[in-house]
Amino acid sequence: MPAYRTVNDIFLGDVEFWRRPLAERHEAFAALREDTRRGGGMCFHEEVTPMGGAFVGPGYWSAVTYDDVRATTHNPNFSSASGVISTEPDPGYLAVGSIIVMDDPKHVKLRRLVAKAFTPRTLQSVQESVQQRAHHLIEAAKATGGSCDFVQAFAAPLPLQVICDMLGIPAEDEAKVFHWTNVLLGIGDPEFTPDLTALTDAATAFLQYAAQLGVQRAEDPRDDLSSRLMQAEIDGERLDPFEFGCFLVLLAIAGNETTRNAISWGMQQLTEHPDQRTRLQANYEAMAPRATEEFVRWASPVIHMRRTALADTVVGDTKVAAGEKVVMWYWSANRDETVFTDANSFNIERENAASMIGFGAGGGHYCLGASLARREIHVLFDEIFRNLPDLQITGPIERLQSNFINGIKRMPCEFTVR
């Protein structure tokens, strides 16, 4: 029996929806896409606070088809300046987003400051560091005797260590950064973010830490991205410590959370599909690029992004009034059956996996760290397959309760120590 008799039974703004099995999520978004294509246009959903509670806020339109998501992100009538999550918990939280909640022309100027650090050519110099760190994680896991938590042992530390190293954050501070990012992106999960106080405290502490690092790098520059940001000029002006702090928080969050979850879901799905894993391990270098795209497509680590209309505009068959919000559901667009065959299934040989929008749907806010994320995923799975070839996920996964990040908090694994 279908869980949703009509699209009116689907409440994407309700935190309870995101606690249900993934199969029900697939079914719900498929129904919404079908309704959109039948001429119903985008559905309108009420909002609730991220931690639950009564319906609040004006609500939002839901872009659920691949075409509507891309049309929204490329439409100049939409702004990200008022926030990018479906419901903003507090205006003060907006500052944490930095350029992600900024429009042009300032957005593009700030983006250019950091873009050179994430080009494929520049990232060649990071390759050795990624490989060394991945190898060290493998050796540390072996010391456990053959069982550990995959997220804590592999998926979480690799991208965290790499981005902290690029930013010049000392190794002894990585645990604090890890905690802060968990809280800031754990909205909806009481383990990480039990209330708004915890959210505000984490945002404040992280911003203060980042601003202080900016002051240090302005006075004593080193060979790291933080120093380059503090020394760079935009129209004759440099970033002040608070602007830099916002920038660093964004880079630290985006540089570890999304890659962590693409890695986690990738291994979970390979365990669920041993035939695909066998083929991948047997011909890794040739198959890895397409498999990496499929990891990100299937995981859709960032479930959604939001835009606000600056003027009356149209998305597909829907008229959106100035001031109204549109939430782009990447999770749904990456499962659009008109673009991806058998879209809810996992397939490392999917021919058009690179068409996925796991790093955003293009445009000015496309993920700066996409190339770095792909490199980290490629290197870590290569190290695991060569050194822990029989690693398997052995227990039930523990999902993050969130409508923003499709995360895995814990996932036990076992392997033979050779």
Image (cartoon, rainbow, N blue to C red):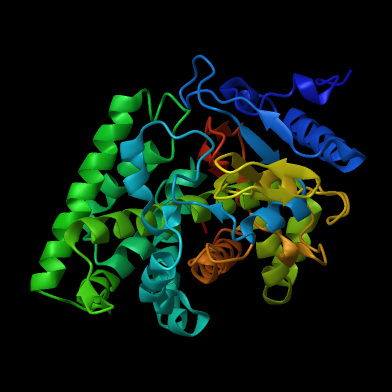
- Extreme residue in the bottom direction: 121
Write down the quadrant of residue 37 in the picture: top right
Name the side, left or right, on which 101 lies relative to 364: left
Name the side, left or right, on which 276 lies relative to 115: right
- Extreme residue in the left direction: 219
Quadrant holding the N terminus = top right
Residue drawn where x is 51% and y is 14% of the image: 54
The location of residue 146, given as percent across then percent down, is: 50, 46
Name the side, left or right, on which 135 lies relative to 76: left
Q: Is residue 150 visible?
A: yes
Q: Is residue 55 above or below residue 248?
A: above
Q: Is residue 216 above or below residue 406?
A: below
The location of residue 257, given as percent across then percent down, is: 46, 50
The count of marks equals 0
Residue drawn where x is 53% and y is 69% of the image: 379
Q: Is residue 53 above or below residue 339?
A: above
Residue 264 vs residue 68, the one in the foreground: 68
Q: Is residue 410 visible?
A: no
Residue 336 vs residue 152, the one in the foreground: 336
The location of residue 395, given as percent across then percent down, is: 61, 33
The location of residue 342, given as percent across then percent down, is: 87, 49
Write down the quadrant of residue 23 in the picture: top right
Write down the quadrant of residue 406 in the picture: top right
Residue drawn where x is 51% and y is 80% of the image: 120
Residue drawn where x is 63% and y is 49% of the image: 300
